[in-house]
Amino acid sequence: MSNSNVGLKEHNIKLHTVVFIMYCLVAAGAFGIEEMIAESGPGLTIVMLILLPIFWAAPQALVSAELGSAIPEAGGFYKWVQRGLGEFWAFQAGWCRTLSCYLDNTLYVVLAASYLGMLIPMSGTVQYLVKVVIILIFVYINLRGIEEVGAISTALSLIVLIAFAAVAVVGFANWNQNPMAPFIPEDSSLIGSIGASLSIGMWMYSGYTSMSNLGGEIKDKSLIPKGLLIIMPLTMLTYVLPTVAGLASVGRWDEWSTSGGVSFANVLALAGSWGFPAFLVVAIVANLSIFNTYIISISRGFFAMAQDNLAPKSLVKCSKKHNVPYVGVVSLGVFCLLACTFDFSILVTVDVMLLMVDYVLVWISGARLRKKEPDMPRPFKVPVGTGGFIAIVTPGITIATVSLLLNGSDYFLAGMIGLISAPVMYFIWKRVYGGLAKNDPEKYPLNPKTKMAPGDLDRMAVVFGLLAILGVIACFFLPWYEGSWAVEYYQETYGSPNSFAIILTGIKVMTGLYAVICVGLKLLGRKLEARA
């Protein structure tokens, strides 16, 4: 057993269980597509749902399958990046991914309680108590281990899959119009329509690396790569078929919404009055399934980092009976209990940029390991050479980069602020806990002046430099991209006629600040490295 798996127990998990856990992590239904339809238009939404699996999801799934088969350790993607790019970049991937999931996992509890409120009117106090009960139930399930989580995920996933299959059948049976018309809204440009919902589409087809956190607890290491190859087409079918069926039957594309507008529930309602409330129940089940599986994945996120002395050591503690990292599970539950009363609209905007760090670093690591360790055993290997491998991941990296600019000025500014937490926390935790040098000081020496690995200041400078470059591009691109509608939109969103100008000023200030920090770290690094 790898050192990174010490404390965790391996289980005889079946392939179907792995697939259903993955389905909960990646999809758990087509919820969220409603917003894409209204923002981008029905035709473009369908095209995006077909193309994103090829250029965005496939690179995730294929690279995760290859690296997961080669490095099946607890911490998954964090360990892959560490093997390919080193300690600093592994922390950036692990921190950004785990922080993002901590922030947004609470949303699924909030959504489940909101859907329940549509069925059973509740006061604010009662709704909060419902959230508390949900959190406590699923924390308890996760404390019992991966087998119990897998059993619950299987049951919940089957309910969701059956419901969306029913939506597709009912929708196709009531086909009465062209589901692709109009292609985009009449008052929108093609690039504007793509940008309006690209982040949603990327979100819908994300999560393929999440299962890798559990690699150390599954005895048959071939199951995760096999499951990834099954889940990708299954997810695409779950999205495309109900969407086409819904638009062809119910139509009213401009009224689709996740908050009180037309939804997949209206499609199922064509079969009878029972359809609408039945689908609300499915919506509750879907959000609970995501919450359940993300607890087990997220709680392992800091586990491997803590073993490498890059997070508090308490996160390594496992229960004696079930071999579960209970501190991570309980900490996530406590966070959710405290956070489920807050408005997460701003936090969600940060999530997309945080997730991009993980995906891009995993892709780069995969390409790097193809060159660095060509003979490393890879039970599953993407059947292309290194050049073909790079060609597969390049569209994903391009989409990730472009999406940072197409989400809007407020999203971009929030992301710029959120991303600096990764190098800052590395600096703090590396100095406090020691990092890999504490496990093997000869292999991972420290600079006595900085108390970090040689070259870490230069690596931190790279992060701030890349953010500064993106900021410069954004300062020119965003005013052109958002055009004349920006002032009115941001005034309506934030309540001030100067909101857009303030946000752009914030981007300029952060860009200048990051450029100064980049140069300062570079000069400081040269000075301290020379003296060490």
Image (cartoon, helix red, strand yellow):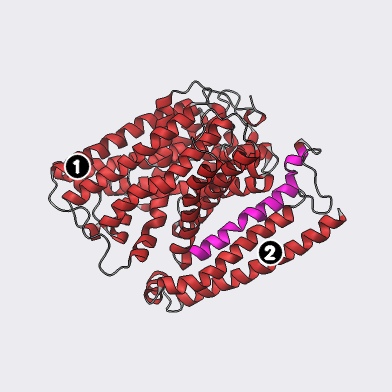
Instruction: Report the residue marked by disc 1.
Output: 275
Q: Is residue 151 visible?
A: yes
Q: Quick check: 67 left or right of 344?
A: right
Q: Quick check: 291 left or right of 320?
A: left
Q: Nearer the viewer, residue 123 or 22?
A: 22
Q: Quick check: 253 left or right of 369?
A: left
Badge 2 amino acid: Cys
Q: Main secondary structure of the magenta part?
A: helix
Q: Is residue 334 visible?
A: no
Q: Is residue 422 above or below residue 5?
A: below
Instruction: Report the residue marked by disc 2.
Output: 518
Secondary structure under tag 2 reads helix
Secondary structure under tag 1 reads helix
Q: Give the residues drawn in magenta, as a range.
A: 412-438
Give the x, y percent position of residue 88.
67, 48
Q: Which mark is residue 436?
A: none
Q: Which residue reaches farthest top?
A: 12
Task: Judge whether residue 427 is colored magenta.
Answer: yes
Q: Residue at x 69, y 60 (%)?
A: 461
Q: Residue at x 30, y 68 (%)?
A: 188
Give the x, y percent position of residue 346.
47, 60
Q: Which is more N-terminal, label 1 or label 2? A: 1
**Mark in the foreground, 2 or 1:** 2
